[in-house]
Amino acid sequence: MSQNTEIDPVYAEEIGHGNSIAAWSCVLIMTVGFIVGGIAFANLAWSIVWVGCGIVVLGLVVGAILKAAGFGVGGARSGASH
């Protein structure tokens, strides 16, 4: 089996991994939501399960807002030089 290290010729640059303030904030908030929802689900606390779902949606919204504000990959405020 050979190891192919070429970049896909369709893309002009290497595909990133989403290392940005927007991505990490989104993932962190969503992880908290999943933990809250999972613990509540195990304890059959259905109202708290929905709170966990709301936290996950909040994480998506925060990530989108931060990306729009320039904190996404290649954004003006991301601090990375891409």
Image: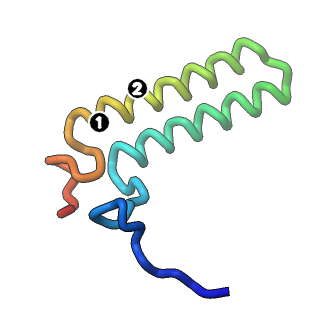
Instruction: Name the residue carrying label 1.
Output: 66
**Element marked by disc 2:** helix
Amino acid marked by disc 2: Val
The x, y position of residue 36, in whole percent, is 67, 31
Disc 2 + disc 1, Cβ < 8 Å: no
Image-based side of 81 in relation to 5, left or right:
left
Q: Is residue 55 above or below residue 79?
A: above
Q: Of the residues under marks 2 and 1, which one precedes in the sequence?
A: 2
**Element marked by disc 1:** helix
Q: Could you say which disc has been placed on residue 29 in the image?
A: none
Q: Is residue 54 above or below residue 35?
A: above
The quarter of the picture where the N terminus appears is: bottom right
Residue occupying image coordinates x 35% and y 43%? 22
The outermost residue toward the bottom is 2
The outermost residue toward the front is 9
Residue occupying image coordinates x 38% and y 61%? 15
Please rate how many residues cluster around mark 2, counting C-alpha atoms within 10 Å: few if below 14, some from 14 to 19, many from 20.
Answer: few
The x, y position of residue 75, in whole percent, is 20, 47
Amino acid marked by disc 1: Leu
Residue occupying image coordinates x 42% and y 48%? 24
The quarter of the picture where the C terminus appears is: bottom left
Please rate how many residues cluster around mark 1, counting C-alpha atoms within 10 Å: few if below 14, some from 14 to 19, many from 20.
Answer: many
Instruction: Name the residue carrying label 2.
Output: 61
Q: Is residue 54 above or below residue 22?
A: above
Q: CA distance from mark 2 to mark 1?
A: 9 Å
